[in-house]
Image (cartoon, rainbow, N blue to C red):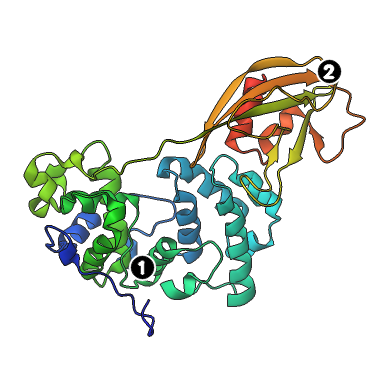
């Protein structure tokens, strides 16, 4: 940001083929082919004066981080049924929000989601700020999310660059380096193209990446950018984006202990308030280390090895050996006993749902 709050981007001349994006062609395509999404105002309704709801757009954008539209739709409808407004979400207990989020992953998003709702209600009179700069001051809202909300809801003429657009632009410019090495140049090229209908343009470019310029296929013949796309001219658009060299993901190993009492109830506890999967529910586990130590069981019982669960986090691969035992509940503290039929309602992340499934509990 410059001292006056104006974004400065590197010149798109840093790109090998710095030709402009045809925004009118993109918008004409979007007017005919926009996806029908539960958080979106259609181009026709937008022309009729219907304004996007910043609460719904914000909620969808947070949910869509690292997650697909297909996976998000059911969660979005559930959240907006339980909490139709930002006031409702702010008033909800954090545990309830975490419980409904279970399965979407990246659980810090859920905690930030709740904190942001509280801040909007407390500090902004339940009204989302209408600029990307002001939106970034809210908990959990970064550069991308603030730009998306500001463009879609308030038509701020700002580049909205997500993973789908990375791919579209990498192909359009035949980018010979990984996107991460030219991110500012791509953003600068996109910024120059942003028209007055900034929100529709942002959503149109997202739709192009999701439906036309897909990761493993490119329907170039129906793409509004085909005539100027250098990857299409080269005849191999899926060659782009160039993949960066990835370091090998480290492996951590450990044990998970599933304990049931005589009635079949399962012992659960909460993870620490900070760190990975903070505040979520779990069964007890050992430490996660580079080598697998012998299991140190929580108590003496007839423990049975039920198999292994593998779960891949962003920065490491986790391998957990799953053990089960029938135990007496008298001497347990720091957690609670849950009926098997109530497990679906617990704030269990996918990892521990895998553990329970391996233990024979759905």
Q: Earlier in the sequence, mark 1 or mark 2?
A: 1
| Residue at left offset 84%, top offset 23% | 261
Q: Position of residue 144 (x, y in %)?
A: 40, 61
Q: Does 7 appear above or below 237? A: below
User: Quadrant of residue 148 in the image?
Assistant: bottom left
Q: Position of residue 237 (x, y in %)?
A: 16, 42
Q: Is residue 152 left or right of residue 256?
A: left
User: Quadrant of residue 155 in the image?
Assistant: bottom left
List the residue tagged with mark 2: 301
Q: Quadrant of the C terminus?
A: top right
| Residue at left offset 41%, top offset 45% | 69
Task: Rate crowding at label 1 as few (under 14), some (14 to 19) or many (20 or more) other CA atoms within 10 Å.
Answer: many
Give the distance between the C-alpha atoms of the residues marked 1 and 2, in whole angstroms.
59 Å
Q: Is residue 28 left or right of residue 70?
A: left
- Secondary structure under badge 1? helix
Q: Position of residue 325 (x, y in %)?
A: 78, 19
Q: Is residue 227 visible?
A: yes
Residue occupying the far bottom of the picture: 4
List the residue tagged with mark 1: 151
- Say the numbered circle drawn on residue 53: none
Q: Quadrant of the N terminus?
A: bottom left
- Secondary structure under badge 2? loop
Most foreground residue, 85 or 19: 19
Q: Does 82 appear above or below 194? A: above
Task: Rate crowding at label 2 as few (under 14), some (14 to 19) or many (20 or more) other CA atoms within 10 Å.
Answer: few
| Residue at left offset 69%, top offset 15% | 305
Q: Position of residue 236 (x, y in %)?
A: 13, 39
Q: Is residue 218 visible?
A: no
């Amino acid at each position: 940001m410059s001292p006056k709050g104006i974004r400065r981007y590197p010149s798109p001349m840093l790109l090998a083929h710095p030709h402009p994006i045809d925004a009118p062609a993109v918008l004409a395509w979007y007017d005919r082919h926009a996806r029908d999404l539960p958080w979106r105002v259609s181009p026709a309704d937008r022309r009729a004066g219907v304004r996007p709801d910043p609460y719904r757009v914000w909620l969808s954008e947070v949910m869509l981080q690292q997650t697909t539209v297909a996976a998000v739709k059911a969660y979005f409808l559930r959240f907006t049924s339980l909490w139709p407004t930002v006031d409702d979400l702010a008033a909800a207990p954090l545990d309830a929000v975490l419980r409904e989020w279970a399965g979407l992953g990246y659980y810090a998003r859920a905690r930030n989601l709740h904190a942001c709702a509280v801040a909007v209600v407390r500090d902004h009179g339940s009204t989302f700020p209408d600029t990307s700069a002001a939106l970034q001051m809210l908990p959990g809202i970064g550069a991308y999310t603030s730009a998306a909300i500001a463009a879609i809801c308030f038509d701020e003429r700002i580049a909205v660059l997500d993973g789908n657009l990375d791919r579209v632009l990498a192909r359009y410019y035949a980018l010979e380096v990984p996107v991460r090495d030219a991110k500012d140049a791509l953003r600068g090229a996109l910024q120059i193209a942003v028209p007055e209908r900034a929100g529709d343009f942002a959503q149109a470019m997202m739709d192009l990446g999701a439906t036309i310029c897909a990761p493993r296929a490119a329907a170039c013949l129906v793409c509004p950018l085909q005539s100027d796309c250098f990857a299409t001219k080269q005849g191999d658009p899926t060659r782009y984006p160039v993949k960066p060299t990835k370091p090998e993901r480290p492996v951590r190993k450990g044990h998970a202990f599933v304990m049931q009492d005589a009635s079949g109830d399962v012992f659960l506890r909460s993870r620490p308030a900070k760190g990975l999967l903070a505040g979520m529910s779990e069964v007890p586990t050992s430490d996660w280390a580079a080598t697998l130590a012998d299991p140190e069981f929580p108590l003496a019982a007839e423990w049975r090895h039920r198999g292994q669960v593998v779960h891949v986090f962003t920065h490491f691969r986790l391998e957990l050996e799953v053990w089960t035992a029938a135990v007496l509940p008298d001497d347990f503290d720091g957690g609670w006993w849950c009926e098997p039929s109530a497990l679906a309602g617990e704030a269990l992340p996918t990892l521990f749902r895998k553990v329970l499934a391996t233990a024979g509990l759905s």
